[in-house]
Structure formats: C-alpha cells, structure tokens
Amino acid sequence: MWLVGLGRRDVLRLEVKAMKRVAVLGAGNAGCAMAAHLARQGLEVRLYNRWEDEIRVLKQQGGIYLKGCLGEGFVPIPVITTDLEEALRGADFVAVVTPATAHEFFARAVAPYIKAGTPVLLNPGHTCGALHFRKVLREAGGPPVDICETNTNIYICRLTAPGEVTVYNVGGVFFAALPGERLAALAELVGKIAPTIRPVPSVLDTGFANVNAIMHPAAMLLNTGWIEHGSGFYFYAEGATPGVASIMAAVDRERLEVMRALGLRPVPFVEVFYQYGATSQRALESGSMYEALRDSEPNRLIRAPQSMTHRFLAEDIPHGLVPMESFGRLVGVKTPVITALIELACVINGVDYRKEGLTLEKLGLGGMDVGAIMQYVQHGE
Amino acid sequence: MEKVAVLGGGNGAFITAADLAGKGFSVNLFEMPELSASVERARHQGGIELEVRGNLPIRPGFWRVNVTSDPAEALDGVKVAFLVVPAFAQKRFAEVIAPYTREGMLIVLAPGNFGGAIEFAQVLKRRGSPPVKLAEMECMIYSGFKNDSGSVWVSGYKKGLRVAAFPGRDTAGVVETLHQFYPDLRPARNVLETGLRNVNTVFHAPIVVLNAGRIEDTKGDFLFYWQGCTPAVGRVVEGVEEERLAIGAALGLELTPNYQVMLDWYGHQGARGPGLKEVMATNPAYEWDTAPATLQHRFLTEDIPYGMVPMESLGKLVGVKTPLTTAIIELAQRMLERDLRKEARTLDTLGLGGVPLGDLQRLVDECGWWGWEGATC
C-alpha cells in the first residue's frame, strides 16, 4: 500500500544497464544466500570476504550448496576471493551484504576500484546505511554512484553447514534509493533479481523500518541476566514476554512519532514484520507486538545470543537506535525508551555507542534542518 | 518488661516482632483490620514461630506476641514503636495511629525510604499529634520471608545499619535508645542521608529490569542475586551506584560506597569479594533470595517511586546527571504501565520543592516538622 508508482518522468530516466556481473561483498549467512540466488538466475557472481577462514570451504568446493525455499543443489560461483579489486573487476552491480558495522570499511575499501555509476545495494542498510556509505565513499575519493538499500535482509537464512546455506524465506522488504529520485530506475533493476522488494520514497523510510533495532536491543537488555547466566533460552519464544514486548512497542511508538515529525509515512512494526513474512495475519490484525513475535515462525527456534557483545547490541544500537534518537532530537520528539536502551547498552558493553554510531553529524546531515535533509535525501545535494 | 509496638504484618514486621520478643521485650503487633488475614495464625496462637537460617545474632523459636488490629491497644504504654511496612503504606499508618500518639514517643520507620519520616511527621502534625520523636533506618535490618500468617524465616541480619532522627540533632539520643534493641546501629546525619543510603534503590530495580524476561517467563524461578546479578547486570548496578554517590557528595553527605556497606553488614555472614557486583553475586545472606514471580513487585513498585525517582529529582536539584537511574525508571514504568514518577515521593510531593538547599538542610538537621516555620526554626 506504500508502493510508489512509477511516474512518467521516472520511466524516462531509466538508464541503468541490465546487470551481468555482480560483486557480492560479504560471505556470511545472507551474502551466501544472495550469491547463490543471483548465480542461479544466471548472473556472474564474484563473492568477496574479508577473512580467508570463512571462505576456505567455499573456495575448495567452488561454490555454495543451497537448500530451502530458493531451491536445492550446488551453485557454482566463479570467483570467491579475499581480493577486493578482483571481486569488483568489471562488476556492473555491487551488493554489500554485511553487518552495518562493516559499512564504513567497505565504503572506504571499494573507493579505488568501483566504477562511476555502478549501483550499490546495501542488503540491508540498517538505519541510514546508504547515507553513511555515500558520505564515507565520497570522503575516500570514490566516484559518484547510486546507492540503494533494504530495511532488513531480503533472505531469512542461516549457514547450516560449512559451505551450505539454507534459505527459509524471502521476505517483502522495503527498498529505497539515495538519491530518492533514482528510485524507479533502481527498483526496476533490483526488482528483476529480487522481486519481493517494496519501493518506499526515501532511505529514511527504510532506515526507520529497521525491524532489528526495534526488536533486538529490548530483547537483549531485558534479558541481560538470563543471557549471561547462560541457559540458552529461546530468544523470542521465551524471552519476548509481555513486559519485554511492551518495551519493543514503546520503541516502535517513539520511532513512528519521529517519522511523523519528519513528514514520513509511519508504518507500524507489526505491518512491516507481516510484509516480511515473519508473522501471521492474526497477529497483524491484533496490532500487538507480543502477538507478532509469538506468531513468528522464522523466529520460533532462534536461541538467545551467548554474550552481550553480540551484534544485536553492537550493531543495532549504533546503527539503529542511535540515528533514531539523533533524528528525534532534531525534530524535538522525545525518545525516552530508545535513550534508556542506549544508555544501558553503553554501560553494559563499556562502549560509547553514540560516538561509534550514526548521528546526524556522522551522516553528513549535521546542522541541516528537516527541509534541507529531505532535499539531500531526494536529490543528493 | 518494656513494651514495644511493631506496626505492620508483612515479612519484616513478623521478623521484627519475633526477634524483639525473643530478646525479652513485650511486643504488640498491629496490622490494619482489613489485612488481618495476614496475621491470622499469629493472633490465634498468640505468637510467631521464627526460623533462623545461618549463623545470625537472632534466637529461633516460638515467641509470644500480642497481635491486635486496634491502634489504641497497640500503642498503649509503648515508648518505642517500629513501623515496618512498605513505603506506600506509611502514610496510611500515620493517619490511623495519629490519635494515639503521645508526646516524646519514639516512632522508628524501619526502613524510611526517601522522605518517609518527613511525610510521617507531616501527617501526624496535620492530624493534631503532639510532637513525637521520629527516626528512620536506611534499610530493613533483616532479610527473610513469611511462611504463612504465623511463621517466618530470617536469613540475613545487617550489622551496623544507619539510623537518623528527624531532625538530625536528635539522632544521638535516638541511637542510644535503640541500642537496647539493636546494639550495632550507627548514626546517619539526617533523613536525607538515610533516604539516599537505601541500597534497595541501587540493587532491586536494575536487577529486575535486566532480568525482566526471565522473571516473566519462569515466574521468578532463579536466585535473584546469585544468578540474576551477572557481570553485565552488575555493571549497571555499579553505574547507578556512581550516580547515587555523586548526588550524596553534591549534598554534602558522607555516603558509604555500597561495596563497603555489603562487607559491613554481611561480613559476619561471610560476604566477600573484590568489588560490589562480585560480593552481591556470592553473598551468603542472599542464598535463599529467589526472584520476584512477577514484575508487579515492590522491587519496582516501591523502590522506584520511593528510591530512584527521588534520586533522579535530587540529581536535578544539585546538577548531577543520572542517565542510568532515568533509564531504569523509563523501562520499568512502561513494562508496568504505571506512571511511577507520579506515584513517587519527592521533595515536590512533600511540599518542599523549590526550598533552597540550605533551608532544606536546616529542616532535616535542626528543625523537624513541628519546629519548621517555612525556612527556619
């Protein structure tokens, strides 16, 4: 219902070349799923990973064993490498499939090799990944490129054995472009390889729809003792109790309030989660955070992390709640629950997540008013 | 045999009544008529069975206690009364006993929580009580739980607990009087200090909030301190503690770091450890302390409005930032769906908001409520 129609002006501007050779950066769960998925569709995939250890098996077997809803079988990948230049050579599309904490590294690292105009997809962008990536890439002397992002991972998947990825579901994810005026062209391009994407007007719409930031910090922090005492409980099925879910719901309300103040269209968590295929129609109709998580088949058997340094805090605080809080401050919307979660995470992990994370200053939006930010997001200047 | 009154009928009141009876005092236990079920068996059998877990300076046994729901009877011939009730109930007890107080009678809030003695004095004076002596302890002196309406067990006894009179200039005399009951009590400067010394403020709510999922899912089936106060939880507790100490310093109060408090109180029971979180997670006095079965528990509903919220507002008064205290309040009140700041007892609700710090200190150090004339006495 929030689909953006392709206007005539956008159609005329379609100029992105169909992709042939794709660099997938990051060979974790989702990177492997995406590489296999794209290779299956006949694209020439070049898969890069920073650490040799994690791709040794893939290199030995020359590809990925794929299981689950995207098909079963061995998928050859012609290039699997730790050499970024090799991965990017001749690539006409780049997919960055990493934790948000690695975006800065990749934006800097690709700068010397990426060709001007190459579309870059952040799958996912988390919150404000595209804005961050663009700023770092420019500062590192990289060429102008179009960046697009999803709000969360297209693939619900896990590496189920060395060299093997199982894809459980391909979710309906929000998709936006930076600059926003390039949305139609990029949506058409990416839609061909990932038909479940749902275009939304701007990278703020994707950024604020970062479902991980809504779920993970609350579920982690309100179960701190249980996580450390180490009984390996089911993270959502047991850990997302009514009280815990009420804090996620409060985060959701604060986030929607900030979106309203920014003039964005606020889509509640439960609706985003349902579109993603992660919960039931019944839960959608109830509108309840608690029900949405209880009814989440993909999350049912997820175990709690073993440590508080897990990416559910280390990523979702600095690349989720911190930028949301920062936007809240800009528009004068109070976010006491988001702030509370950030404070606790900082003390628990001994990290200043506001310093590490994506504040407006870090995104290159410092000193701008809402109008100027919207202008920048839409037109790139 | 000197007569004393114990007001209340919960865990703490039962242990207090039984312990004092065991020490040879004649004890009247008063509970509100509407709560008489909670003291039913004690009334019926004319006393309380007290079980002692661990090596404590408390005598186990069946101790005779006169259980009544008549405040006149409870306070008849009594020079010292101990009020052992949750903070939110203190006001109601003040209203009920006001007609039966006598000049010079000592009423000890055990414990006071923030502003307990001030509020108690305000209610008594408004109800026409003659000036009584008021004092408050910094914390409950025992830890333990009732088995039923006639028996209770105790597993902890805090040595060297602080007590302050309201006003503070009466403290020395009050401590001397109370030494016949608790020979190791020590003085605090005033009731602002006892309010800020309450360790429950720093311990309870952070541990509950950071174990909220486990409490709800398992109905509290774990040991609250031994298993719930993990290193990360401990870091938050220590962070709240730092905020408390900073506020105390800004108010010119000499607060003892809670690490030292733990060693002082529970060293005799074997408490050890290199730091606060370690000593909490291994304190033998906590061996029996299971977690609350629900979030709707006084660890949040009492310790936030009568501990953390006052701390937050004192922080504002003296310009000390309290981000962790605020964080715990915010999360707790949303989980409980209650406005805990509105329920709180603060300088504002005591009618003392905006009183300059110097005047406030005169009130608690010198004047007391009967002598207070707005700025001086």
Image (tube, helix red, strand yellow):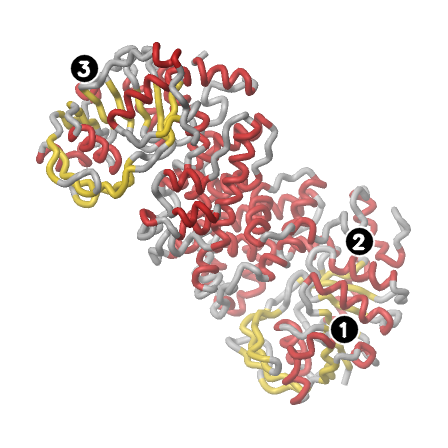
What crowding class fits label 1: few (fewer than 14 Cα within 10 Å), some (14-19), or many (20 or more)?
many
Tag 1: amino acid: Ala
Disc 1: which chain? B
Disc 2: which chain? B
Q: Are marks 2 and 3 on the same chain?
A: no
**Quadrant in which residue B140 is drawn:** bottom right
Q: Is residue A114 visible?
A: yes
Q: Which residue is mark 3?
A: A90
* Residue B314 x/y as whole percent: 70, 45
Q: Say which of marks 3 and 1 sits in front.
A: 3
Spatial CA span between label 2 and label 3 = 78 Å
Q: For mark 2, give the secondary structure.
A: helix
Q: For mark 3, give the secondary structure.
A: loop
Q: Which mark is residue B364?
A: 2
A324 versus A372 height, above or below: below
Q: Please state which of residues A302 and B170 is positioned toward the viewer in this rendering.
A: A302
